[in-house]
Image (spheres, rainbow, N blue to C red):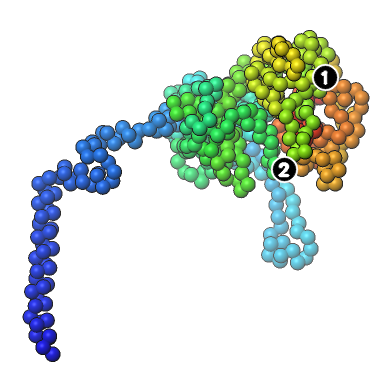
């Protein structure tokens, strides 16, 4: 009981002391701020890790990194490519959803619909030339290009090349920003790159492109698609810069703000970026674009030489290539190359698999020299590439001379085949063996860069190709991939 009067006596004094102390602290703080704002500013920056004395201009300069400058230099030239095409869309009966299929199997039908889609591209000259992917504009009935400043303009398709996945558009518009072009000759593994494009399309409302940053992960990559994917890509730039749906056709840029590649594909299990993206080297893109603009078609470099993998080891790996076929009268034939010879190096590139050789051919121009080192010889063989013959004497009526069946799991196990799907060659005429180099036991897995999953799909794709068109088969032999090119007859 004696404590209560003391508590009542000293509690008001304690409260008054606390209030007075708080008021004094506030007064000192106010005086400090009003008397020395610069010193308070230095204190805050010191707490944030900024050196004392650093000015706003210094900080702004540090924020303006190479990536920022690259984005400022290139992003105005990156465009959205809007496409309208007609597709067969499968329609389901709504009663099936309501009744849960109680009245039997679900019913569906198809209907032709005009379907919008989009990708990316970039302006490469002030005449209005825009580069993008073939798969972005394939089958397009209307192409509308949107610039980052919001301007829309109808685009004209100059030409496309399915084999390299490159397309050229043209627009008529003044004051077009142009992307600076670089080279892949000095690219280094680990150097910074920026991928530009329009990921997820119209889900992001404004027209400015998205920039994602990463490094060069690898060079000269060959991309073999899964059953769900379609396109084969050879000699690609690999990056971990995020590339998502809608980025296709946009530029891959180095830290100097120069375009070194065109975004083309991703490796993904779920459809989104997983840090493995691929871009077409800019030199190949420009070569294809020049041919499409000047000649209306791509002038393929031809040496008349096909290669196949060496026998696979017990792990299913192949290390090296050998000549499988030499066309009579071709540049390779005149240079003295013969079937069975083992090739180790071509134009200073080591040949580990046939796809290394095919990637090299993609980058050759007509008239270029190809230097090939044959195993067991000291001097390399010189071959001068020629234009692919416009109409070779031997055209192939493929379906009459080739018998294929859909690859099955038992056949895979029995023959030691690595591919999961494709068309197994079960019969082929002697003439076709001589022309194409195919033989029984080969598995055709791709045609003109498209993956095939069955014999029926191979026949369907062949039936859609016009006569006198060049056709490329990609096939498995010795657990390695090879290719052969021919002109289709009817």
Q: Please name the residue shown 71% across and 32% down the image.
A: 449
| Relative height, residue 106 to residue 341 (above, below) | below
Q: Please name the residue shown 75% across and 25% down the image.
A: 321
* Residue highlighted by disc 2: 227
The residue at the far bottom in this view is 1
- Taking 265 as reference, is 414 left or right? right
* Res 196 seen here: no
| Relative height, residue 5 to residue 92 (above, below) | below
- Taking 32 as reference, is 355 left or right? right
Quadrant that contains the N terminus? bottom left
Which quadrant of the view contains residue 159?
Answer: top right
Q: Position of residue 171 (x, y in %)?
A: 53, 25
Q: Position of residue 461 (x, y in %)?
A: 78, 34
Q: Position of residue 148 (x, y in %)?
A: 45, 34
| Relative height, residue 12 to residue 349 (above, below) | below
Instruction: Tell me the distance, in whole angstroms, between the alpha carbons under discs 1 and 2.
Output: 33 Å
Q: Which of 186 and 313 lies nearest the eye of the viewer?
A: 313
Name the element at disc 2. Answer: loop
* Res 221 seen here: yes
Residue 339: mark: 1
Name the element at disc 1. Answer: loop
Q: Which of 255 and 374 lies nearest the eye of the viewer?
A: 374
| Relative height, residue 269 to residue 57 (above, below) | below
Q: Please name the residue shown 64% across and 18% down the image.
A: 348
């Amino acid at each position: 009981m004696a404590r209560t009067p003391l508590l009542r006596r000293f509690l008001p004094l304690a409260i008054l002391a606390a209030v007075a102390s708080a008021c004094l602290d506030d007064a000192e703080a106010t005086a400090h701020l009003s008397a020395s704002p610069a010193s308070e500013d230095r204190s805050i920056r010191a707490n944030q890790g900024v050196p004392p004395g650093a000015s706003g201009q210094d900080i702004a300069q540090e924020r303006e990194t190479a990536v920022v400058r690259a984005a400022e230099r290139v992003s105005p030239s990156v465009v959205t490519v809007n496409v309208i095409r007609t597709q067969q869309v499968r329609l389901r009966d709504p009663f099936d959803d309501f009744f849960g299929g109680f009245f039997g199997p679900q019913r569906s039908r198809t209907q032709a619909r005009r379907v919008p889609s989009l990708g990316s591209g970039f302006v490469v000259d002030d005449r209005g030339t825009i580069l993008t992917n073939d798969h972005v504009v394939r089958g397009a009935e209307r192409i509308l290009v949107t610039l980052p400043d919001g301007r829309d303009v109808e685009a004209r398709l100059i030409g496309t090349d399915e084999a390299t996945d490159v397309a050229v558009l043209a627009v008529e518009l003044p004051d077009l920003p142009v992307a600076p072009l670089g080279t892949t000759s000095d690219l280094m593994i680990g150097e910074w790159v920026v991928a530009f494009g329009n990921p997820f399309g119209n889900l992001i409302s404004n027209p400015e492109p998205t920039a994602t940053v990463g490094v060069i992960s690898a060079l000269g990559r060959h991309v073999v698609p899964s059953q769900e994917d379609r396109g084969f890509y050879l000699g690609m730039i690999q990056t971990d810069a995020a590339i998502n749906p809608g980025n296709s056709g946009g530029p891959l840029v180095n830290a100097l703000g120069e375009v070194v590649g065109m975004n083309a594909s991703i490796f993904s299990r779920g459809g989104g970026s997983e840090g493995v993206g691929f871009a077409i080297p800019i030199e190949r893109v420009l070569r294809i674009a020049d041919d499409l603009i000047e000649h209306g078609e791509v002038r393929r470099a031809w040496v008349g030489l096909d290669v196949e993998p060496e026998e696979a080891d017990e792990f299913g790996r192949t290390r090296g290539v050998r000549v499988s076929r030499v066309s009579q009268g071709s540049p390779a034939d005149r240079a003295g190359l013969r079937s069975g010879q083992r090739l180790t190096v071509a134009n200073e590139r080591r040949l580990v698999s046939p796809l290394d050789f095919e990637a090299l051919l993609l980058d050759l121009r007509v008239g270029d020299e190809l230097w090939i080192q044959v195993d067991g010889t000291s001097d390399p063989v010189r071959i001068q590439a020629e234009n692919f013959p416009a109409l070779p004497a031997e055209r192939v009526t493929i379906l009459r001379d080739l018998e294929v069946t859909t690859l099955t799991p038992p056949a895979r196990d029995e023959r030691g085949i690595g591919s999961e799907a494709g068309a197994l060659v079960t019969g082929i005429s002697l003439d076709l063996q001589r022309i194409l180099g195919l033989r029984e036991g080969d598995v055709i897995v791709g045609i003109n860069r498209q993956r095939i999953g069955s014999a029926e799909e191979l026949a369907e794709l062949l039936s859609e190709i016009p006569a006198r068109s060049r056709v490329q088969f990609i096939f498995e032999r010795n657990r390695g991939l090879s290719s052969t090119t021919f002109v289709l007859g009817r």
